Image (cartoon, helix red, strand yellow):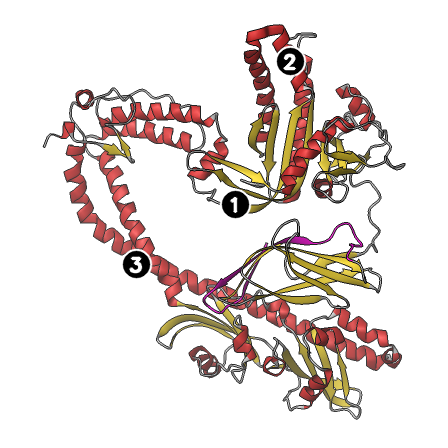
Amino acid sequence: MNYSVFPFRIVGIDLWNYGDAAMTKKQIKSRFFFPIGAKLVIIISILLLASLGAVISMVSALSTQEAQRTAEENNFIINIRAGSQAQSSFAAVREAVLFYMEMLERLPALGQDPGIESFFFNNNQNIAAIGVMGREDPFFIHNDQFLALNNIPAASVEAYFASPHTATRGSMRFYNAAPVFQTSLLTTVFIRPGAAGDETVKVLFSPYDLFESFGMGANTSFFINNYGSLLLHPDIFLVLGGANFSSLPIVEIMQREGDNNRQVSYEHEGARYFGAYYRLAGTNAAVITVIPHDIVFEAVMGIRRQNIFLTAAVLFVAVGFIWIFSKTISRPVRLLAAAALKIEEGDFTVDMEPQSRDELGLLTESFDKMSSALNIFGRFTSKDIALRAMRGEIKPGGLPKHATIFFSDIRTFTETTERFTNIFGDEAPNRVVQWLNEYFSRMIGCVKETGGIVDKFIGDALMAHWGTVSTAGSPAEDAFFSIKAALMMRNAVIDLNAQRPKNDPGNPAIRIGCGINTGVVIAGQIGSEDKMQYTTIGDPVNLASRVEKLNKIFETDILITEDTWRLVRDKFIVEEMPEVTVRGKEKPVRVFAVINFKDSTRSPQTMMQLREILGINAFKANKPAAAGDAYQVSGFRQEHKPERAHAIGTTPASPANAPMIKMTSFGSSARIQGPAGTRVPVFFSWNLSNFAPDTHVCIEVAEDQDFNSIVEDRELAGTLSVSIPLQAGTYWWRAYPARAGSREPVVQSYPSGTLVVDTDAKERIKIYKD
């Protein structure tokens, strides 16, 4: 076989067709004096066959041992952590009840105060009822809100407490009350030395603070008593059904051995498990954590396949460096590898010269042409986005992102381009482009230096965003860096204008306006197979663009919205502008002009100083908007004088007793998974403080961010939680307080966020918090 004319492919590139279309097979053949492939193939095949079996066997054995060791350690750690948290939680319930009973016994007058019982349950919302037996007048109190929320009659609780539950001095005993009340409830029984002798105290409470620790995952943790009764389990249906695990092998081992904790491996119903148990000190209960062997070792087969490819690659490289042809291969390979790494890191300025006239020489030449093409391509898109997409860090489709959006443009750009045309005629387009390129080079540098992404150029306008492709750590930090970039742009423009010759018609001074807004947007790759662009869409993007145009009205250069201001209020000096009604917004929008960093000692410190530096006029409240502007400026209020700027964070803060609502079930975003083919119950819970007695909570769940398609609408008075069943899908939610008979919020800021409801086939419920 003549290897010098054999079709040669490298990394999916057909060398017959790559590069200059005029290059023929005969010309490529003349570049090869002796192909290196024929020299290496025999040696590599022998080494591969000899070493592959041994290496794969060894690595597979080590991987199996490591997987088992890691699984046992993780299972034990999870078990100890779940047990410790359960013990702390139950001890807290016991101490709270004992303190309450001791307080009533020492201060009998408190028992006459109806508010003391409400105070106790408000501070211990997970406790449903307390009963004390063994005294002449049986003591029974219950949490009205808790029982009403779960549709539990107080009489049924009192009857349940009358049933026998054994207790011993110095020990807490636990019983599963879920089958009786059909909700996750536990009963703890213990002996309390009272003034008239020992008393049996029974406490009915919800272990909701342990749901996350006992959630379903690769490791499953559950809680049982010494009778084998299931007290807490990720599968709520087992708890509600009163399941008993006394026949489970790990439970039998625990009862037989009698120690406090241990790791074991056992078999149950044809499957093997790693398990660990942890007895709770001073109780009749224990936490058990298990993980199936199949889950632990499911990655071993994948590792084995990877090791085959890894071994082949390592042997291939080793042969090239060790054998007699290493001198003809090693240097070009190192150069190509270094060049590939530079390209992978985003540096496309690779200049390579072929060192030999063989396949590597041709590859080097082709690689150099490819890098030149990539360098040109990189100027037409964002290198950061292209590299992340290449590495698989940006997946197809859109994702909700809490991002900060930035828009800027050049003031009086149309008039400037007309002057270029009048002065330079046919040369005007080229001069305009040069003028813009110098400006955009400075602006792009400010965006990149603060970790932002340049989305697009729209004529003289620039769009960028922070918190989409990557984040600085939180929405507040992303917003901070966006405003920092805007301030850097301001200084760059001032510096750029200072360097320009005065009255130069080919290089006029520049004034810019910047608009910044923060919110949840949809970020993703939008376009077609022929052209794709990573961008952001949504109402926050539109608002940022419209706020940028307000700079013309307010005679400012950097404006931020209220949503951005709330995230960075302690970082910058701002002045609030009059409220503006913007197209698409029912309520007026609050905007703030950014003056400087709060901790900066350099000018400007006020809006007046800033306008003097920028050479712009002071804003007049009655200044008419330009024709076609989609804004309505409210009357300029007395307290918003243009000359009086204030540092965000130094303005009078909300009083400590200001009304507040705080969600406690999950954060601004969550993912819920529930049983397949059903409506998944989503549990919303919250805390209220400092509201008027007639305040109720409105819970709205919608299919769109603007809440035009509301699927669930609840008005709740006197409750602190609600369960809403939802079909699988993506929703937006918000919870706000309002007066009875009104749907208008009584506060300006209230919790909201996104919610993804999904189903699987395992009859499990999972909650992933943000």
Q: Check disc 1: other Cα within 10 Å, few if <14, some if 14-19, many if 20+.
A: some
Q: Check disc 2: other Cα within 10 Å, few if <14, some if 14-19, many if 20+.
A: few
Q: Is residue 745 above or below residue 364?
A: below
In terms of depth relative to the viewer, which is nearer, 194 or 676? 676
Q: Is residue 442 above or below residue 466?
A: above
Inspect the image, locate mark 2, and give the three-letter code of the amino acid beneath it. Answer: Glu
Inspect the image, locate mark 1, and give the three-letter code of the amino acid beneath it. Answer: Gly
Marks 2/3 in contact by CB < 8 Å: the verdict is no
Marks 1/3 in contact by CB < 8 Å: the verdict is no
Residue 768 visible (yes or no): yes
Q: Which residue is mark 1?
A: 398
Marks 1/2 in contact by CB < 8 Å: the verdict is no
Q: Quadrant of residue 336?
A: top left
Residue 676 in the image: state x and y as whole percent: 48, 66
N-term mark: 1 or 3:
3
Residue 480 visible (yes or no): no
N-term mark: 1 or 2:
1
Q: Is residue 481 above or below residue 706?
A: above
Q: Which residue is mark 3?
A: 61
Q: Label 2, label 3: how many angstroms apart (C-alpha)?
A: 76 Å
Inspect the image, locate mark 3, and give the three-letter code of the amino acid beneath it. Answer: Ala
Query: Which residue is at the far bottom?
Result: 136
Q: Quadrant of residue 767?
A: bottom right
| Residue found at x 65% / y 74% | 206
Q: Which residue is mark 2?
A: 418
Residue 600 in the image: state x and y as whole percent: 75, 30
Q: Is residue 750 magenta?
A: yes
Q: Check disc 3: other Cα within 10 Å, few if <14, some if 14-19, many if 20+.
A: some
Q: Is residue 126 left or right of residue 342?
A: right
Q: How many marks overall?
A: 3
